[in-house]
Amino acid sequence: MKIYTKTGDDGLTGLLANRRVPKDDARIEAYGTVDELNALLGLVRSGGVDSAADALLTSIQNQLFVVGSALADPVTDGPFHNLVTPLHSKGLEVAIDTMEAELEPLTRFILPGGTQEASRVHLARTVARRAERQVVHLARQPGEHVPPDLIIYLNRLSDLLFVLARALNHRAGVADVPWSGV
């Protein structure tokens, strides 16, 4: 099978519901950003994170394919539309709580940075927030539906990435740098 189909040469792409939309459609922007986040997490993993972080990020990358599939299925009773469930977010919350147990409580805003791995995770966090904003934007479009559990998952994921960046720095012996304020 060839990788190029030429079906998108007119600036349209297909959704799972056999509907063609412009490549800059809000739904395409949303799942395209989820795909970008997934690729960025692959970059994070290639940088040599510890085995626990690697396993967590591998699981998240797999979950992001579920998120992308749900976003690519615009039909509320479609086979992929409702695949993201509260269990996905609960798993992220458990991981957050586990990592937070190894960290000092956060009392101030911190600057993104530290080790290269943590810095990449902070960048991934910002992409996750952008994906969340785009999914919320999609949900506000007339005639569009996004399951609430999907929005909750992306919100929780950005929280997890923040805590993971802090944990990676902590494990490497690098302190958080507090924001000095104005």
Image: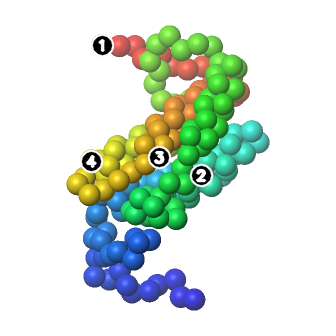
Front label number (1 vs 2):
2
Q: Is residue 151 above or below residue 99?
A: below
Q: Which residue is mark 2?
A: 63
Front label number (3 vs 1):
3
Looking at the image, which residue is at 47% across and 46% down? Answer: 150
Instruction: From the viewer's perspective, tell me whether residue 11 is left or right of residue 93.
Output: left
**Type of residue at label 2?**
Gln
Instruction: From the viewer's perspective, tell me whether residue 137 is left or right of residue 98.
Output: left
Looking at marks 4 and 1 on the same chain, the residue that comes earlier in the sequence is marked by 4
**Type of residue at label 1?**
Val
Residue nearest the viewer, comparing 96 with 71: 71
Which numbered marker is on residue 182? 1
Residue nearest the viewer, comparing 137 with 17: 17
**Type of residue at label 4?**
Arg
Q: Quadrant of the C terminus?
A: top left
Q: Position of residue 117 (x, y in %)?
A: 61, 39
